[in-house]
Image (tube, rainbow, N blue to C red):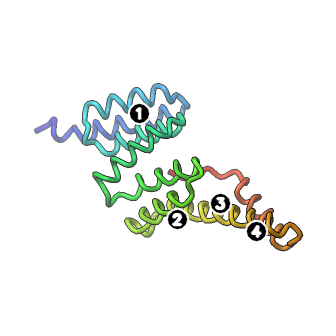
Amino acid sequence: MAGVLLAPQARADEASEIRALMAQGDLAAALARSEKAVDANPRDAQARFLNGVVLMDLRRDDEALAVFQRLAEEYPELPDPYNNMALLHARAGRLELARQALETALRNDPGHATARANLGQVYLMLAVRAWEGAVAAAPMDQPLQHKLAAARALLAAPAQPGR
């Protein structure tokens, strides 16, 4: 009985250790720790999610995307795997897939502030794409060029997307 009671605390401590290693910038150790946690308990969604985040931080995007996709399949009600899938899609320039993933995250949790902020970022990226095409077709359209410049400035502003 005591082992059952300690198990959630042990998983929480493991997650805290993984997050601490990530915060220290020791991604190799965070990856090893998260892989060990997943191997010890393959059904631990939190450990798997953190493993995906570490992979994402290491720019091992295909592996991270696979982790988040599996989590979304197994736990379709969770918004966070969709949010992180969207970040990976956006990073790869797949903005429509990013938008779809964020809309799914928000259907699952309409109050998910990070997904909502990331959706705004994706909409802005889509707007830039559209305005770039419009400016290419009408290079003398000054109001459109101002909109494009303003949107690019917003995208360039230092803001780390949430995950």
Q: Nearer the viewer, mark 4 or mark 1?
A: 4
Q: Amino acid at mark 3?
A: Met
**Secondary structure type for disc 2:** helix
Look at the picture and state if 109 lies above or below 34: below
Contact check, label 2 and label 4, Cβ < 8 Å: no
User: Which numbered disc flags the more N-terminal residue, 2 or 3?
Assistant: 2
Is 94 left, or right, of 69 in this rendering? right
Is 133 left, or right, of 78 in this rendering? right
Q: Residue at x 47, y 63 (%)?
A: 100
Marks 3 and 4, Cα distance to the nearest angstrom?
14 Å
Marks 2 and 3, Cα distance to the nearest angstrom?
14 Å
Can you tell which mark lies on residue 84? Answer: none
Look at the picture and state if 38 lies above or below 108: above
Q: Tell me the quarter of the picture where residue 7 sits.
A: top left
Q: In this figure, which residue is indicated by the disc labeled 1? A: 17
Q: Amino acid at mark 1?
A: Glu
Marks 4 and 1, Cα distance to the nearest angstrom?
49 Å
Marks 3 and 1, Cα distance to the nearest angstrom?
35 Å
Can you tell which mark lies on residue 116? Answer: 2
Q: Nearer the viewer, mark 1 or mark 2?
A: 2
Marks 1 and 2, Cα distance to the nearest angstrom?
28 Å
**Local crowd size for mark 3, using a 10 Å CA cut-off: few (<14), some (14–19), many (≥20):** some
**Secondary structure type for disc 3:** helix
Q: In this figure, which residue is indicated by the disc labeled 3? A: 125
Q: In this figure, which residue is indicated by the disc labeled 4? A: 134
Q: Amino acid at mark 4?
A: Ala
Q: Nearer the viewer, mark 3 or mark 4?
A: 4
User: Which numbered disc flags the more N-terminal residue, 4 or 1?
Assistant: 1
Q: Which residue is nearer to you in this view: 46 or 23?
A: 46
